[in-house]
Image: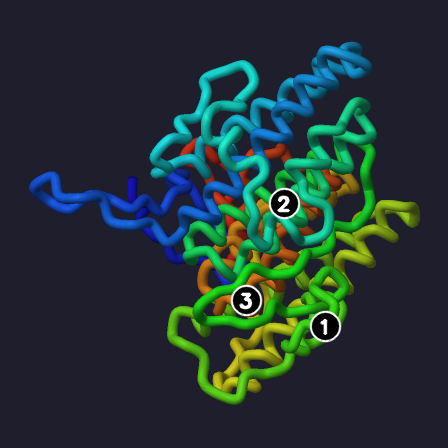
Amino acid sequence: MQRRRRRTTLALGLLAAATVLTACTGSGHKDGGEQRQADPDLPVRTRAVAATDALLAAYDTVIAGPGAGRAGELQPLRAELLRHRAAFAEGLPSAAPTAGGSATGSTAGATAGSSGPAATAGADPTATAAAVTTVAELGAAERRTAQARLADLPAASPDLARLLASVSASDALHAVALGDTTPVTAGAPAPAASATASPSGPTGTAGSTAPATAPGTGTPAASATPLPDGTATALQSALAAEHAAVYGYGVVGAKLPDDQQRTDARTAFATHEARRDTWRRLLAGSGATPGAAAAGYQLPFAVADAAGAARLAAHIEARLTDVYGELVAALPADRRVTAADALRGTALQARRWGSAGTAFPGLPEAAATDSPAPTPTG
């Protein structure tokens, strides 16, 4: 099934979205029953399914053993993995997702030992997940799988790259929920026709030929040529979203007591300022004129106390996951990790501030009913 692309619609930054999640690119058939066309995403999808199957098997091992007492916590995470598998398996010739039980069918058996950049970047997630016996090891396996998915970003089509980034963020959320707070670091990128290296940074690849860094910690090298229209539009949307986030966190910090929450808000404020400056410099370096912040913003709801401030922070971060999901798909292959890092960061922050979780951060689902977005007042 072909997923219709959606342009992020922003009110200077924070998306109010309710679109149908059909996370697939599909490869289709020719009219008249002719032979199915080759799917260029097939190797990436196959590796993604195999890695997810390995995680599912690890969950089954832990739930049946030392993690039995935490089955109520583990089963919802496992259910999200089944949804990930279904999305990755869309269009694969022999990877029909299982409705329940351990999803270790024919495709898993055929691909668990498959080679490829995602399977060989650092520890092979399909191999390391097979050795999992405790909840702590399960969290580490989720983190390693999140990293492996990032390695395949440059080799994927734009829509599949967005799905990979979303599921990688979900894997990272699972890892944190299971007690693994080790930062996710991207492995060696898979080769792509349009890219030879993945942007590096604190979560990038050592030795990458691109001197870019992840937003929030540095500035990617500006392109010497104008950006394609779609890329420039997505970057302007991300910049507008960060302008609004910086404004919103100014309100958040003013309503919080001088405790750990205010410290967290200050850290988030600085992160959004740095990401804003990153996108602004990237746009300016490509010859585009970066969008300016509005004079003010109308908040989506009144913020009168600390509870309201935390709710606003969660709202800001949840909206930004949607923006960065779009940016992953819009950026050139060699810059996708940068946007995926931002997507993961906002998803983790959203959860930290109390936002309801989703199996697909950055891919808004039809049932989403969040608050309306802030709008500029001048």
Residue 299 visible in image: no
Task: Pick the residue in front: 33 or 375.
Answer: 33
Q: Quadrant of residue 348?
A: top right
| Residue 189: image location, x then y, percent | 60, 61
* Label number found at residue 326: none
Residue type beneath disc 3: Ala
SS state under label 1: loop
Q: Residue at x 90, y 46 (%)?
A: 260
| Badge 1 or badge 2: first in the primary sequence | 2
Distance in Å between CA atoms under marks 1 and 2: 24 Å
Of the residues tagged 1 and 2, which is closer to the observer? 1
Hey, which residue is sitting farthest right in the picture? 259
Residue 16, percent across and down? 47, 48
Label 1: few (<14), some or many (≥20) within 10 Å? few
Q: Which residue is under mark 2?
A: 169
Residue at 52% x, 56% y is: 323
Kindly identify the amino acid type of the residue bearing the numbered disc 2. Ala
Q: Is residue 79 above or below residue 30?
A: above
User: How many numbered markers are drawn?
Assistant: 3
Q: Is residue 99 above or below residue 189?
A: above
Q: Position of residue 51 (x, y in %)?
A: 59, 37
Q: Residues within 10 Å of mark 3 (few under 14, many from 20)?
A: many
Task: Tell me whether circle 1 and circle 2 mark residues in contact (CB < 8 Å).
Answer: no
Horizontal relation, residue 260 to residue 367: left or right: right
Q: Which mark is residue 207?
A: 1
Q: Is residue 378 left or right of residue 314?
A: left
> Residue at 77% of width from left, 42% of height from top?
305
- The label on residue 240 is 3
Q: Quadrant of the N terminus?
A: top left
Work out whether residue 318 or residue 216 is closer to the camera in this orientation and state it: 216
Q: Viewer-proximal residue, 214 or 197?
A: 197
Separation of disc 3 and disc 1 at Cα? 32 Å
